[in-house]
Amino acid sequence: METWLVIGISGVTNGGKTTLAKSLEAYFTAHLHKTFFKENLILNKVVALCQDDYFLPVDSPRHEMVKKLNHINWEILGSLDMDRMCQDIMQVLGQKFILYNCHQLRRARSDEDSEMGERVESMDEFNLFADHFLSNFLAKYDENGTGSRTTNLIKKSKNESYQSMNIKINVLLLEGFLLFNHSFTRDLCSIKFHIHLPYERCYARRVQRVYDPPDVVGYFEMCVWPLYEKHYREFKGRKDIYVLNGEIAPDSIFNYVLNSIKDLL
């Protein structure tokens, strides 16, 4: 049995999301074809995609301009070719695939907790590998245009024992500053991390970077930070997203994330 585990890494500008994503990619790549935290899980493949690679060209007519600054607004989903990113994701997953859902795969820990046992079994039966939130996107990004991909997420019987099943895990790492503000990329991720920084630290890091095209005076204050706060509010408080402190050392963040993935599996 071969499944895809999709890990999402989002965060504020200069928060360290790219550093974290590359560290995870390097670690997973070094452990290919080895046990993946559990005896029945073998790491089979690692693929990484970055949302920054899908910015529209500077001369795209689809861009929104910030009139007061005469500058492109790069902080919105409209500045990205998300259709192309979603198509690339679907190409990576392949024509036939199964998603590994960490929470729904986990069985009840105690027979004494009958209520939890009933809830987990019900989730296994109705939601495990189901296409309840992906069906529209599977049809939209079907390269054949037939919508046949809507049946490719396989439902499993609640009677199967997943703990004893030998599973090959393919890891898809998705990284991007608006990853959780797009319904497809957000819902596809089984494990989600978001790195946050306070205003002052974020600004101090931002001014040390050179962008192409470069920031104009006032762009951070008028666009970058207000839109980050707006986008962050859209998913802040969700229990399925781990919020990380970007002021902590990158090694500490990496170790925390790795342990969190281990615990969820």
Image (cartoon, rainbow, N blue to C red):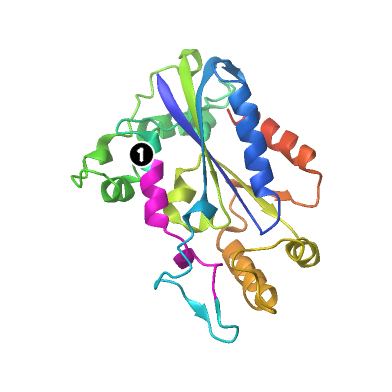
Residue 97 can be seen in this image: yes
Q: Determine whether, in the image, residue 232 is placed left or right of residue 201.
A: left
Q: Where 197 falls versus 112 (above or below)?
A: below
Q: Tell me the residue at 58%/16% (across/down).
A: 35
Would residue 86 be counted in the magenta stretch? yes
The answer to which quarter of the image holds residue 111 is top right
The answer to which quarter of the image holds residue 201 is bottom right
Where does the image place residue 45, in percent across and percent down from the top left?
49, 25
Secondary structure predominantly adopted by residues drawn in magenta: helix
Query: Which stretch appears magenta?
Result: 72-89
Would residue 171 be counted in the magenta stretch? no
Where does the image place residue 227, in percent across and percent down from the top left?
60, 70
Q: Determine whether, in the image, residue 240 is placed left or right of residue 221.
A: left
Residue 133 can be seen in this image: no
Q: Where 246 falls versus 198 (above or below)?
A: above
Secondary structure under tag 1 reads helix
Residue placed furthest toward the bottom: 68
Q: Tell me the residue at 54%/58% (across/down).
A: 178
Residues 191 and 110: in front is 191
Where does the image place residue 159, in percent across and percent down from the top left?
38, 19
Numbered-mark total: 1
Determine crowd level at label 1: few under 14, some 14-19, many 20+ residues with C-alpha closer than 10 A: few
Residues 185 and 223: in front is 223
Q: Quadrant of the N terminus?
A: top left
Residues 23 and 156: in front is 23
Q: Quadrant of the C terminus?
A: top right
Q: Where 56 falls versus 101 (above or below)?
A: below
- Residue designated by label 1: 91
Where does the image place residue 152, in percent across and percent down from the top left?
29, 34
Q: Determine whether, in the image, residue 139 is placed left or right of residue 239.
A: left
Q: Tell me the residue at 62%/56% (across/down).
A: 237
